[in-house]
Amino acid sequence: MNDLRAASLEYLKTIEAGGDVGVHYAPDAVQHEHPNALTPAGARRDLAGLRAAAERGKAVVAAQRYEVHSIVAQGDQVAMRVTWRGTLKVPVGKTPAGGELLAHFGVFLRYRDGRIVEQHNYDCFPPF
């Protein structure tokens, strides 16, 4: 279980650094982003979609960081409660370029052979 917690924290560090998130996923991984202010209809992404979304994000976010408030591992699953902060390259809503977006996330990961095979994100954004 400690290994999965460590793997999950490494995953978040890869995102913060702008690295290839694909190295953390199994080839058949699926991510479910539940409806939120940025993605009102939600999204379902395979590995190619995850990589494409990460690249699109780099055009919008200059820097991002995660503050992990809690992380629990049981069996092949990890649950995290995190706060995300992103410094914008472009305006989003009323937040100008250079401003910061904030979100509170519930992230649920399921692993197989040390790699993420399924992910559910519940992203809550205060008005921006």
Image (cartoon, rainbow, N blue to C red):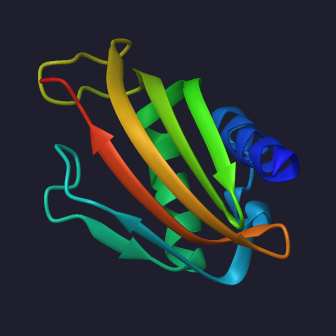
**Toward which corner of the image does residue 113 lie, by quadrant?**
bottom right
**Toward which corner of the image does residue 10 lie, by quadrant?**
top right
Where residue 116 sits in the image (x, y, percent)? 68, 68
13, above or below 5, in the image: above
Q: Nearer the viewer, residue 112 or 89?
A: 112
Q: Nearer the viewer, residue 8 or 102?
A: 8
Q: Residue at x 65, y 33 (%)?
A: 16
Looking at the rendering, in which quadrant would you find the C terminus?
top left
Count of numbered badges drawn on the protein = 0
The answer to whether residue 125 is left or right of residue 118 is: left
54, above or below 49, in the image: above
Most distant residue in the top direction: 99
Q: Residue at x 66, y 40 (%)?
A: 12
Most distant residue in the bottom direction: 28
96, above or below 120, in the image: above
Most distant residue in the front direction: 74
Where residue 55 sits in the image (x, y, percent)? 54, 55
Where residue 103 sits in the image (x, y, percent)? 34, 29
Q: Residue at x 51, y 65 (%)?
A: 119
Q: Residue at x 40, y 54 (%)?
A: 121
The answer to whether residue 17 is left or right of residue 50 is: right
Where residue 15 sits in the image (x, y, percent)? 65, 42
The answer to whether residue 56 is left or right of residue 36 is: right
